[in-house]
Image: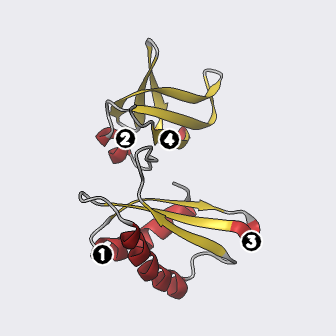
Amino acid sequence: MASKETQIAAMLRATVAALGFDLWGVEYLSQGRHSVLRLYIDSPDGVSVEDCASVSEQVEGVLDVEDPITGEYTLEVSSPGLNRPLFTLQQYAGCAGERVEVRLRTPFEGRRKYKGVLKGVEGEDVVIQVEDQELLLPFGAIEKARVEPSV
């Protein structure tokens, strides 16, 4: 996560937990007047639209007081869904065995995008099986990763 996203996640984690949810991750897409702050919440019982509205209402209060983002933005709260984004090494480890799509910040072996089976985590590396090759991708080099829903 980028530093702005890390700061916001740390600021909101307790508020989201107090409502009975885990803060799965935070995305901040800075696009001038159309910026978006997206929170993903999760729960063993699932997440409803009402849950998202409740979390959004509470989080808005914290964001208004703390004011971590200058300028206008849209707050979105949702479930990570079936094609959940992965934000932490623990999430990668927990999704071992799933098919994933990974995009790197810079090319590795001439490519930035990889699709394969997530094998797990070794230290600070994410292990992914792409065809007949097992790759160790440094966690810090990953720009974005998502679980591919099984059909």
How packed mark 1 is, by other alpha carbons closer than 10 Å (few <14, some 14-19, many 20 or more), is: few
| Residue located beneath label 1 in the image | 19
In the rendered image, the residue lying farthest to the right is 32
How packed mark 4 is, by other alpha carbons closer than 10 Å (few <14, some 14-19, many 20 or more), is: many
- In three-dimensional space, the C-alpha distance between marks 1 and 4, rounded to whole angstroms, equals 27 Å
On the image, the x and y values in percent for residue 100 come to 45, 33
| Residue located beneath label 3 in the image | 33
Q: In this view, does 52 lie above or below 62?
A: above
SS type, badge 4? strand
How packed mark 2 is, by other alpha carbons closer than 10 Å (few <14, some 14-19, many 20 or more), is: many
SS type, badge 3? helix
Kind of residue at badge 2: Tyr
- In three-dimensional space, the C-alpha distance between marks 1 and 3, rounded to whole angstroms, equals 30 Å
Kind of residue at badge 3: Arg
- In three-dimensional space, the C-alpha distance between marks 2 and 1, rounded to whole angstroms, equals 25 Å
How packed mark 3 is, by other alpha carbons closer than 10 Å (few <14, some 14-19, many 20 or more), is: few
